[in-house]
């Protein structure tokens, strides 16, 4: 009786060890692949301008027009370019006894003592730490004499000043693995191990990886019957994307330095770290999956039950704007891929890429339509 009872127990333990080894072999394969994909010891961080921003020599000094409001784009929480109270023609001529007066979005006079918006001695408007609430129409009233003998001339120049943010951009990957039976706990354990290894792989790049979807399906193969497959969808984005840009107080935050010294690492350290060159993260992930294929190709023994299916890794680049912001190449042709604050009459309730029409919205940056 005792001998017959011990027999099934030993066989049960052998089955448990054999099943556990399925996950172990798959996990070892992942670990080896991650080890072989070496991360460079140091990765340079470049300050990235909004893609598509048309940079010119005059980008940091903006002149007005008597015919239409000039659009100005200021990154949220950053210092603005100098908004000049002159036209392009008047910028290069002498003005006798000029006087300047700026009015904000609600008609309120912008005073010289204002802490957030300053008026220079030559009448330029400069914002030190641009907030969403500062967006709107600004008007400068200019009085001057062309010569001492002539009468006083008066001009009214309007500027539409918008806050903007970098898009929340990320890579979305999909991959498929040959799997254990769909109700097996080993699939769940493998899923967690895969995400852990990918997270460690990208940690030095200031990136985070998020599992968006994991599903197990029965797939009918040509001349091979049914097999179980895991379908993974995950994203790779910056660790600090959701926090948004921080106020820039360093002397290198002058717009001229921001725009023209893009490759300077000293200013990059004062900005949020983007997912250190997203292309580098993309390349690491591709090498990681390719490495699994190479390792499996060199194996002399039987394949593990859970393994990556060659050629199934797919990647999509996705742009999203934060709520209250959107992209509009027709309305903002100078900054076509910037997430610009939604104007009155529009809103963006979530992380889409466009501001939606809302006639009842009366503010900039609306997130709801009441």
Image: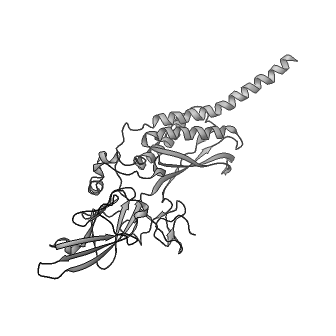
Quadrant of image for the N terminus: top right
Q: Quadrant of residue 74?
A: bottom left
Compared across the picture, whether 4 is left or right of 131 comes to: right
Q: Residue furthest left?
A: 149
Q: Nearer the viewer, residue 279 or 207?
A: 207
Q: Which percent across, then down, holds residue 359?
A: 53, 75
Q: Which percent across, then down, holds residue 40?
A: 38, 38
Q: Nearer the viewer, residue 48 or 317?
A: 48
Q: Quadrant of residue 115?
A: bottom left
Compared across the picture, whether 114 is left or right of 4 comes to: left
Q: Which percent across, then down, holds residue 15?
A: 73, 29
Quadrant of image for the C terminus: bottom right
For residue 86, above or below residue 207:
below
Q: Residue furthest right?
A: 1
Q: Nearer the viewer, residue 119 or 207?
A: 119
Q: Which percent across, then down, holds residue 150?
A: 14, 82
């Amino acid at each position: 009786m005792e001998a017959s009872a011990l027999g099934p127990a030993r066989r049960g333990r052998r089955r448990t060890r054999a099943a556990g080894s399925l996950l172990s072999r798959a996990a070892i394969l992942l670990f080896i692949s991650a080890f072989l994909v070496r991360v460079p010891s140091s990765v340079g961080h470049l300050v990235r301008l909004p893609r598509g921003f048309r940079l010119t020599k005059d980008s940091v000094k903006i002149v007005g027009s008597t015919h239409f409001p000039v659009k100005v784009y200021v990154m949220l929480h950053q210092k603005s370019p100098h908004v000049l109270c002159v036209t392009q023609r008047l910028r290069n001529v002498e003005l006798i006894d000029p006087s300047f007066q700026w009015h904000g979005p609600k008609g309120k006079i912008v005073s010289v003592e204002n802490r957030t918006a300053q008026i220079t001695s030559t009448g330029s408007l400069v914002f030190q730490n641009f907030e969403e609430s500062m967006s709107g129409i600004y008007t400068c009233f200019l009085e001057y004499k062309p010569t001492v003998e002539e009468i006083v001339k008066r001009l009214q120049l309007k500027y539409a000043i918008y806050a903007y943010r970098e898009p929340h951009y990320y890579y979305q990957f999909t991959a498929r693995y040959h799997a254990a039976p769909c109700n097996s706990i080993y699939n769940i354990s493998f899923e967690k191990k895969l995400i852990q290894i990918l997270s460690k792989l990208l940690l030095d790049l200031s990136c985070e990886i998020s599992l968006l979807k994991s599903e197990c399906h029965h797939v009918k193969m040509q001349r091979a019957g049914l097999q179980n497959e895991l379908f993974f969808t995950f994203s790779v984005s910056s660790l600090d994307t959701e926090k948004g840009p921080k106020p820039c107080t360093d002397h290198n935050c002058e717009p001229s330095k921001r725009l023209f010294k893009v490759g300077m690492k000293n200013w990059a350290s004062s900005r949020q770290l983007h997912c250190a060159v997203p292309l580098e993260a993309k390349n690491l992930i591709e090498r990681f999956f390719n490495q699994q294929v190479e390792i499996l190709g060199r194996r002399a023994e039987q394949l593990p039950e859970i393994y990556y299916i060659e050629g199934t890794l797919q990647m999509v680049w996705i742009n999203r704007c934060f709520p209250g912001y959107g992209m509009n190449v027709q309305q903002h042709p100078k900054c076509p891929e910037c997430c610009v604050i939604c104007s009155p009459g529009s809103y963006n309730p979530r992380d889409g890429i466009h501001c939606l029409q809302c006639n009842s919205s009366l503010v900039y940056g609306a997130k709801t339509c009441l």
